[in-house]
Amino acid sequence: MEPAELVFTDATFSESGGACIGSVSDGSLSVANGKFENVIPLPLSLFGRVSATIAFSSGSVLAVTAAGVSYLATGPARFVEAYEG
């Protein structure tokens, strides 16, 4: 597992169901030529109209529309025997 951030360019967003914090439970990322459900290809750097929906285990949902998205590793990878998120 590697700590990371999704970086959206020129983004607008909306939150529903409360504060969007904590573990991610579901999500999708759509671009002009495809849609990714619950996984994203790495490395990631996409430009053009991008939309994302990220659901959190708390029940809150973040919806993002942007001009691009990229993946940014924020720390070293570590081995995880089982992921409970």
Image (cartoon, grey):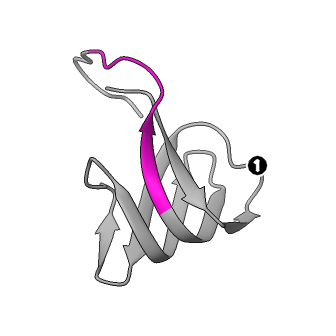
Viewport quadrant of the N terminus: top left
Residue 37 picture quarter? bottom left
Residue at x-position 46% and y-position 78%: 48
Residue at x-position 58% and y-position 71%: 66
- The question of residue 74 being in magenta is answered with yes
Is residue 35 toward the left or the right of residue 14 in the image? Answer: left
Residue 14 picture quarter? bottom right
- The question of residue 71 being in magenta is answered with yes
At mark 1, the secondary structure is loop
- Estimate the x, y position of residue 40 in percent, counting from the top left: 31, 55
Looking at the image, which is closer to me, 66 or 26? 66
Residue at x-position 28% and y-position 47%: 43
Residue 26 picture quarter? bottom left
**What residue would you read off at disc 1?**
19
Is residue 76 toward the left or the right of residue 55 in the image? Answer: left
Is residue 70 toward the left or the right of residue 56 in the image? Answer: left
Residue type beneath disc 1? Ala
Find the magenta span and give its range.
Answer: 69-78
Q: Is residue 58 above or below residue 17?
A: above
- Estimate the x, y position of residue 19 in percent, counting from the top left: 76, 49
